[in-house]
Amino acid sequence: EAGVTQFPSHSVIEKGQTVTLRCDPISGHDNLYWYRRVMGKEIKFLLHFVKESKQDESGMPNNRFLAERTGGTYSTLKVQPAELEDSGVYFCASTGWTGEAFFGQGTRLTVV
Amino acid sequence: SQQGEEDPQALSIQEGENATMNCSYKTSINNLQWYRQNSGRGLVHLILIRSNEREKHSGRLRVTLDTSKKSSSLLITASRAADTASYFCATRLSMDSSYKLIFGSGTRLLVRP
C-alpha cells in the first residue's frame, strides 16, 4: 500500500513568487493534516481536512496560505506571495479509523 | 504557549547505551505519541500511549506516561547508530474535535558508533 506522498520534495523560490505543494494521502483516509517545521523549531499544525471540508484551519499563519482538497482526495497548499519566513519543511499526514497519523516525507521550501 | 516540550534538546551517547528523552505538556490529553525523524526524511510513528495507560513497550522502546505530572518519557535501550535521529512527542488533546497532533520541538539524538 502506498504511503502519504508529497511533491515536490524540495522547492527553492524567490520572495514574492508562488509555490504550490501537493499531498496525496493514503487511499481511503478521510482525515488530512498539514504541518510545518521552521528551522530548529517545533512542528506546528496548519490545518485539517475531513474529506473535502476544512475542519480546523486555526494554524494557518495568514491569508497568503490557501489549502484545498477538491474531491476529498489529494490536497494542495499554495503560498502566494511567498515570504522569507515561509521557509521550512511542510509535512502532510493522513489518518484512518485507527487514528494513527501517517506522514509524508515533507516538502522543504526555501524562499530566497 | 507550547503544549509539548522535549528534554533534553540534544543527546549524545555511545552505541549500546540507553537513551532517555522526556516530554512535558500542559493540557489534558487523549493520547501521546512519539515520532522519529531521520535527517531529510518524514516522520515515522513509533508508539502511542493512551491517557489511561502508564507504560507501553515496543521492541527496544519503552514509553511511560504520568498524567498527574503531565509528562512522558521515551527510553531506547541498547542504542544503535541507526537510532540517530530527532525524536518528537505529540499530544492529541482531550477536548479537540480536530484530533490534530501538537508537537514539541524535539530531541536530537546522536548515537556514536
Image (tube, coloured by chain):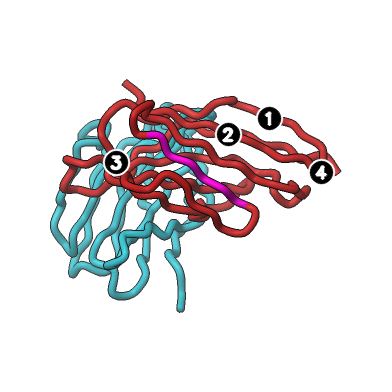
Chain colours: A cyan, B red
**Left or right of B107 in this view: B91:** left
B7 or B110, nearer to the observer: B7
Mark 1 and mark 4: Cα distance apart in space: 12 Å
| Residue under label 1 | B11
Q: Categorize mark 1 by other alpha carbons within 10 Å: few (<14), some (14-19), many (20+).
A: some
Q: Tell me which numbered mark, 4 or 2, is placed earlier along the sequence.
A: 4
In reply to whether residue B79 is colored magenta, the answer given is no
Vertical comparison of B39 with A86: above or below: below
Which amino acid, by three-letter code, is at mark 3? Leu
Q: Look at the numbered disc 2 and give the secondary structure of its residue.
A: strand
- Residue A73 sits in quarter: bottom left
Residue pictured at 50% horizontal, 48% vertical:
B35
Q: Residues within 10 Å of mark 2 (few under 14, many from 20)?
A: many
Q: Nearer the viewer, residue A14 or B97?
A: B97
Specify the principal SS of the magenta part.
Answer: strand
- Three-letter code for the amino acid on which mark 1 is drawn: Leu
> Which chain does the residue under circle 1 lie in?
B
Task: Give the magenta range.
Answer: B61-66
Residue drawn 48% across the image and 41% down it = B64
Disc 4 and disc 3 on one polypeptide chain: no
Indicate which disc residue A46 carries. Answer: 3
C-beta proximity under 8 Å, tags 1 and 3: no
Badge 4 amino acid? Glu
User: Disc 2 marks which residue?
Assistant: B21
User: Can you identify the residue that label 4 sits on?
Assistant: B15
Seen as rendered, the residue at the extreme top is B1
